[in-house]
Image: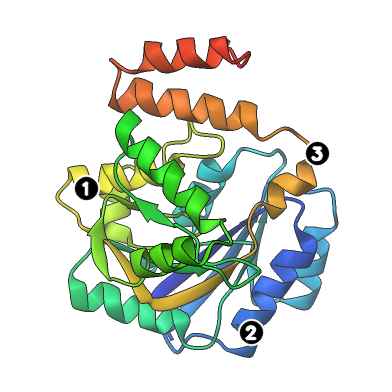
Amino acid sequence: MTPQLDIIIVNYNTATHVVACLAALRDAPPATAHHICVVDNASTDMSVALVTEQWPDVDVVALSANVGFAAANNVGIRRTSAPLILLLNSDTVVPEGAIDRLVARLEASGAVAAGPRLIDATLAPEVSFGPMLSPWAEAVQRLRLKLAGSREPWARRYIARHVSQERTVDWVSGACLLVRRAAAEEAGLLDERYFMYEEDVDFCAALRARGGRILFTPAVEILHLRGRSFAATGRAVSPLYDRSHLRFYEKHSPRWAPVLRAWLAMRGRAIR
C-alpha cells in the first residue's frame, strides 16, 4: 500500500527512547498507511544498530556527523514522498489512535500543519504552541511556561484551560508536527541555519507566510519526555538556544536583534 504518511524521527544518542518510541508505533500502529524513517545524527550509543536490528522495516539513515535537528529532518523529508509528513521527536510515546486523529483534524480543518497537546512524564500538559516571537509575546510565553511548571492549583487550572481549546496558532512544537508535504516544500523545508531551537517557530512562520494555517488540537495527546537528546550530549543548552534565538530575531525582527545581542552580552552570554 502506498504510504500516505511519512513519520520522520531524528535521533541523537537517545537509544532507549527511540526504541520506546518505535515500540509504541509498532504495538499500536496508525491505520493511516505510513512509512517510518529514522535519521540518526551520528550517535555513539548504538542507536543505529539497535533500530536496524529490531525494526528491519524502518528506514534508517545514519549520518556521518551531527548536522542538527532542522537539517536532519530535511534529510528525512527529502528521502520520502508521502503527501503528509509527521516530524516526531525520539523522546515521544504515541498512544493508540493518536496519529490517525491528528491526520483527521488536519484534513477536516484545512490547515497545512497541526500539532497535538503534549504532556510530560508527570502527565502535566506542556505549553506546546504560541504566538510569533516578539519581546512581549516571549514575556507572556515565559510566564505561561512558568505556570505550567507550578504546583499551585490555580496555575494548573489556568494551563489546563489554555491547552484545552482547539485553535489557530502561529506555531506548534516540532516535537510532534504534522504538515502537508506540498506546503513544506513550498516553504523551503526547515531552515538549516538553526542547529537546534526555534526551527519549528521559523518553519511555521514560513508556512503562514504562504497563506497556510497552523492548528493546535487537544483532541490528540502525545507523551513527550522532554530534553532527552540534550541530556545525552553533556553540553550546555544555553549557547545553542541563544544562537538560534538571535538568528530568529535577525531574520524576522532585525530591529530587535541588537537589543537581544546587547542583553545577552550583559548577562555574560555574548554571541560571537
> Is 34 left, or right, of 205 in this rendering?
right
Q: Read off the residue under disc 2.
A: 26
Sequence-wise first label, 1 or 3: 1
Amino acid identity at mark 2? Arg
Instruction: Tell me how far mark 1 sits from mark 3, CA to CA.
Output: 35 Å
In the rendered structure, find residue 4 and report the number of the disc placed on it. none
Instruction: Tell me how far mark 1 sits from mark 2, CA to CA.
Output: 33 Å
Amino acid identity at mark 1? Arg
Residue located 64% across and 89% down the image: 27
Q: Quadrant of the C terminus?
A: top right
Q: Read off the residue under disc 1.
A: 208
In this view, 141 is above or below 262: below
Work out whether residue 115 or residue 4 is closer to the camera in this orientation and state it: 115
In this view, 48 is above or below 199: below
Q: Are marks 1 and 3 in contact (CB under 8 Å)?
A: no
In this view, 110 is above or below 23: above
| Quarter-of-image position of residue 64 | top right
**Rendering colour mode:** rainbow
Amino acid identity at mark 3? Gly
Work out whether residue 171 or residue 165 is closer to the camera in this orientation and state it: 165
Image location of residue 254, percent across then percent down: 30, 17
Work out whether residue 1 or residue 141 is closer to the camera in this orientation and state it: 141
In the rendered structure, find residue 234 and report the number of the disc placed on it. 3
- Does residue 189 appear in this view? no
Image location of residue 159, percent across then percent down: 42, 63
